[in-house]
Amino acid sequence: MQLFKSYGALLANDHSLSYGYSVMGWLNTWFGFEHNKNLVTLAGMIIFLIPMVKVSQYKHFHFKLLALASILVWVVIFNHRAESPTFIIAMVGVSLWFIKAEKNLLNIILFIASCILTMLSPTDIFPSQLRNEFVNPYALKAFPCILIWIKIVYDMLFLQGSKTPAALKSI
């Protein structure tokens, strides 16, 4: 029992130490927002759950895919300890979203931004000066994923019926 108590204390202290590459880290670095992380997570949870009230959409493949994409991105961007390798989970969600997304200018820009800032910024092919002076200090690694998650939620809220292309219907 003592082990669980010490683990709980560790988690409580850990929760107050770091923002990581997360919504909270982004809010802190851009706006100086230093309020309760639990409130930010709760707000994210509520926003995540709002589209789920559209029970009539559950039968549509597109809605299910967006729900999966949403949760894959959500678990990373609302993780106060998210690190660079964790974003492979979010990028799977981003990729699932983009497969089904309308290929308009906004969606293409969001996808390219996520590829550059989220996937390439920690690599050697990305200029280290940009990474060290802009991407890391301003939590830019998480920013495209945050925007895409908001777009996924928007798409889920305003999705009308099945939009599954014929090629995906056989899957």
Image: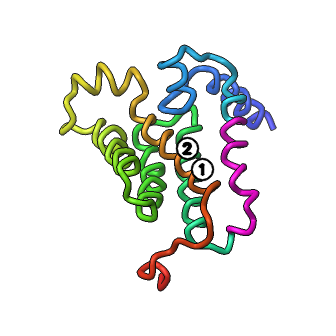
Against 4, residue 139 (above or below) is above
Residue 25's x, y, as percent?
52, 25
Query: In the drawing, does residue 105 fall left or right of residue 125?
Result: right
Q: Which label was assigned to residue 123? A: none
Query: In the drawing, does residue 124 fall left or right of residue 157?
Result: left
Q: Residue furthest right?
A: 1
Which residue does the image show at 60% across and 65% down from the upper left?
A: 63
Mark 2 element type: helix
The stretch in magenta equals 42-57
Against 17, residue 165 (above or below) is below
Residue 164's x, y, as percent?
51, 74
Callout 2, which amino acid?
A: Ile
Which residue does the image show at 40% across and 38% down from the upper left?
A: 84
Mark 1 element type: helix
Q: List the residue tagged with mark 2.
A: 150
Q: Quadrant of residue 57?
A: bottom right
Q: Quadrant of residue 168?
A: bottom left
Query: In the drawing, does residue 12 fall left or right of residue 63?
Result: right
What secondary structure do most residues of the magenta stretch adopt? helix
The crowd level at tag 2 (other Cα within 10 Å; few <14, some 14-19, many 20+) is some
Against 58, residue 119 (above or below) is above
Callout 1, which amino acid?
A: Val
Front in this rendered view, residue 88 or 148: 148
Quarter of the picture holding the N terminus = top right
Which residue does the image show at 19% across and 30% down from the upper left?
A: 127
Q: CA distance from mark 1 to mark 2?
A: 5 Å
Query: In the drawing, does residue 11 fall left or right of residue 19?
Result: right
Q: List the residue tagged with mark 1.
A: 153
Front in this rendered view, residue 29 or 111: 111
Q: Are marks 1 and 2 in contact (CB under 8 Å)?
A: yes
